Image: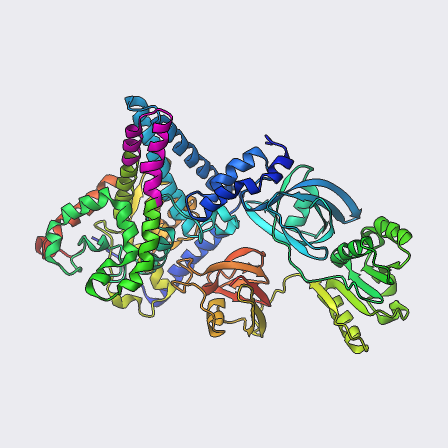
Amino acid sequence: MTLIPFVVARRSARLLAPLRALVARGWLREASVDAVLAQLHPAWRLNRVFSRLVSRRWVADDMLALTLQPNGNWRGAEPGQHIQVYLEVDGVRLSRSYSLTAVMADGSVEIAVKRQPGGRLSNRLLDHLAIGDAVELGEPFGELTWPHQAQAVLLLAAGSGLTPLLGLLRNALGKGFNAPVELFHYVRDAGQHAFASELHALQQRYQNLRVRPMLTTEAGRFSPAHLHAFAASDVLTCGPFGFVNAVNEWWSSTAAKTPLQAESFSPPELNSNASHRPVLMRFARVQQEVVGDTRTSLLQQAEAAGLRPAHGCRQGICASCTCLLLSGTVRDQRSGALLSEPGQAIRLCVSVPMGDVVVDI
Amino acid sequence: MRTDRLLTDSELAAFAAELDDLGRRTRADLGAVDARYIRRLRSVIRLCTAAGRGLLLLGWFPPTWLLGTLLLGLGKILENMELGHNVMHGQYDWMNDPEFSGRTYEWDIAGPSDFWRHTHNHIHHTYTNVLGMDDDIGYGVVRLFPEQRWKPFYRWQPLWVTLQALLFQYSVAVQHLRLDKVYKGKMSRDELRPLLRVFTAKIGRQWFKDYLFFPALAALIGANALAVLAGNAVANLLRNLWTFLIIFCGHFTERAAVFPREVVENESRRHWYLRQLQGSSNLKGGKLFHILSGNLSHQIEHHLYPDVPARRYAAMAVEVREIARRYGQTYNCGSLAAQFATVLRRIWIYRKPNGLGAQPT
């Protein structure tokens, strides 16, 4: 139900400061305030960032670009960053992170969602989300930045790895970056060359840009030979782990001075046959990384690393040690169930990492 | 009197495996239905509370005053039991919805949620009915089992229990302060001070809301402030009596067992299951009764699976009862009146050092 226009809801975010203060001090329940605001406009909340879907268009056979207009709680984002998108599926508020392919002057952002076979959230976003629907967003994060001082920039993308690079590229060209830029986009089928018409238009408009759509079925996976000796001073790459790894090996073998800017995404590693091996555990809040094993609980391992997470019974009863699994897979020792949903609450004392994990401690 | 068969190690392992399996099956089945249930319940509570407070603004007119008071009391009971208690156990953490997050939920009752998460989720659920460890056994003012050492103070316990029932929410709130330890000098006043600050702040907010804000609001709009004040006080009283009734029937009935301190040394999960079954007692009743009790009428199932959404206990109870029967364990279940009569009997008998010739429990 929409009782007031979105623009009013967005502009009045600041007026709610007294309510925010009351909520922070425990005099009011945030959920109750949010319930009233949501009645007035579905994307209005006290603190949480909700957005309104403004437009949707297909940019590849399997990729949809969504333009979202966040409410007044949004603090802005930089191109090249990504955001969490939350949506409820079967009673569970799922979250996935998507790169911003564009950041508009009015605060709207564009993300591109690729259909994942069996993906619970992507399919819901692609098939069920209609113009005007409210979508919750998280805070933007990510450190890819455009090298404005570069003499020549090489962008290497594989699959949906194009999305953060496209966001950076559009922004840099718009701001007048005029050194040579080459963009290689590796995909399996021609229909997966996302944003082909936009990229074509950009190439027409900006003489310093060259776009090179690559098909792995024809040219094979990334090889330095594809670059035809394009002398890049800076390289940005994004794609699956294997791809980014190959780029990294090549770049570090050259005489390059600037470090590679890379981001990789990979499906969660599953290691169910209980072979014990070292895993990398990242404790996000304290920004600490330790090597652990796939045998002992996260609680014990965190304590061994000198952390002191809140806990109680140490046997999965009291829920005192509940915290969020940000990425990776853990096994619940009580049920043997594998949990790999990002943003899911897990109990440290009965959760064992099954691969590299990031936990919100 | 309980007649439990002593289980061999292999029997105990099989018993625990069956309970594990039931928990696993139930957890795997959680989804949209459970999410809808808890949201609807939350909305019903809002509606009851709002309607109750609205009716109380009509003054002393008996039909509206009574109905308003009852609705407000009902809202408070539901919020306390079926929503607050269960959410704070982390029963709905899987939804990943901040509104129903067990770590942050703050309930509408005198005791701060953080206190409760420690005294109840951790202490009571881990050390259920272990003498000297589970402070919920008589809350320090009532002697319910002959194994509890008698003190002259217990002679008047029928009076203490009556006071406790009338002021139950404060009795629960004060538990975490460990005033007994402070009194005996085992805890310093410096340790007490920060707890006391949280405690008084929460009670202050509760009192402000029920005994100042809403009466003042009534006076402001020309309604009868005293009628509002009285209605709020009676609603709180009703909630106190009801929660006292349900909670005392959970572990202090005639056939509930208590355990010596030694049992928790190196106690395995299997023994923990058995102890939960033996130390808890269920109440028979209809669907509405179960909801009003926060499904604590299925105390046995709640203690076996504290983090499974309580609306599932009724279905689980059928299987738990069958498992208990096969392993020769008493499944302690009776009507509210019958179970409460046995609790009252305990309170009466054990006020004396060797009540009824120290009848074994």
Task: Say whether residue B360 is visible.
Answer: yes
Residue A339 x %, y % = 55, 59
Residue at the (77%, 76%) spot, across then down: A252
For the residue pair A74 and A222, the one nearer the viewer reads as A74
Task: Report whether B67 appears left or right of A13.
Answer: left
For the residue pair A305 and B23, the one nearer the viewer reads as A305
Residue A258 x %, y % = 77, 72
- In the rendered structure, does residue B221 fall within the stretch colored magenta? yes
For the residue pair B272 and B153, the one nearer the viewer reads as B153
Name which quarter of the figure residue A51 lies in: top right
Residue at the (46%, 48%) spot, across then down: A24
Task: Report whether A76 appears left or right of A227.
Answer: left
- What's the magenta bit mostly, secondary-structure-wise? helix
Write down the region rendered in magenta.
B205-233
Residue A77 x %, y % = 67, 53
Task: Say whether residue B331 is visible.
Answer: no
Question: Which colour style is shown?
Answer: rainbow
Residue at the (46%, 36%) spot, across then down: B43
